[in-house]
Amino acid sequence: MSLRINDTAPNFTAETTQGAIDFHEWIGDGWAILFSHPKDFTPVCTTELGYMARLEPEFRKRNCRIIGLSVDPVTSHGKWAADIEETQGSKVTYPMIGDPELKVAKLYDMLPADAGVTSEGRTAANNATVRTVFVIGPDKKIKLMLVYPMSTGRNFDEVLRVLDSIQLTAVHKVATPVNWKHGEDVIILPAVSDDEAKQKYPDGWKAPKPYLRIVPQPK
């Protein structure tokens, strides 16, 4: 099953470090970030989980829940969480999914169907493709997918920036330009006519080209 942006995020039930969940019910009417890891006790992922623990209050402000996944049992996650807190200085308070049968990894197309049915005996190298970030909206649709190699730590400040953009553009008929950050100018969508834009932006806009109409970020 190949996933794309705007596909419905596959639902599943799973054990986590905070108990059993139904994924769609757990998301509720807010946003969610599912980010996956190829193995517990891996160095790059240890730094990532710690950083996300520090960022969690920022995601919470945006009505966005965080959940991690690693291709190991929940009992292993608990031991790893202690290492993360010790080495990164932040306690992981969000849930981590146990996926020892590789069900979620396969469901989200992070491992092939013939990858087997157990995490036992598998190494991080075997699971190298389980390194994806999914941003999921209240409609349970996938809004973003980022896939990283094992050797490169993920930029979760970028994920936060993208979430700001996705949430803004879900409400207003605008797009965000390159390297945009919250509070900066945005672009009026091409589908919005000039007449419609004048109603929304009576003070006008900058237009270095007719198709490039730049306005302050809507409040």
Image: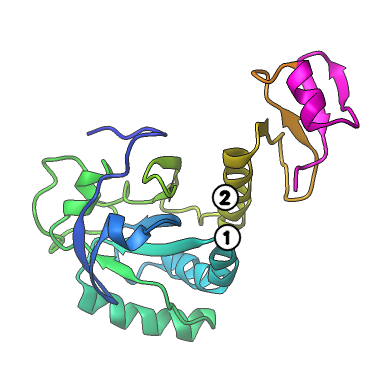
Is residue 124 visible to us here? no
Mark nearest the camera among 1 and 2 is: 1
Residue drawn at the location 82% of the way across and 40% of the way down = 216
How far is mark 1 from mark 2, CA to CA? 8 Å
- Tell me if residue 161 comes above or below residue 175 in the rendering: below
Amino acid type indicated by mark 2: Leu
The spot of residue 205 in percent (x, y) is: 87, 27
Amino acid type indicated by mark 1: Arg
Magenta segment boundaries in residue numbering: 194-219
Label 1 sits on residue? 62
Q: Earlier in the sequence, mark 1 or mark 2?
A: 1
Tell me where residue 84 sits by quadrant. bottom left
- Tell me if residue 37 comes above or below residue 107 in the rendering: below
Quadrant where the N terminus sits is top left
Query: Is 197 covered by the magenta stretch?
Result: yes
- Tell me if residue 218 comes above or below residue 90 in the rendering: above
Label 2 sits on residue? 163
Query: Is 210 covered by the magenta stretch?
Result: yes
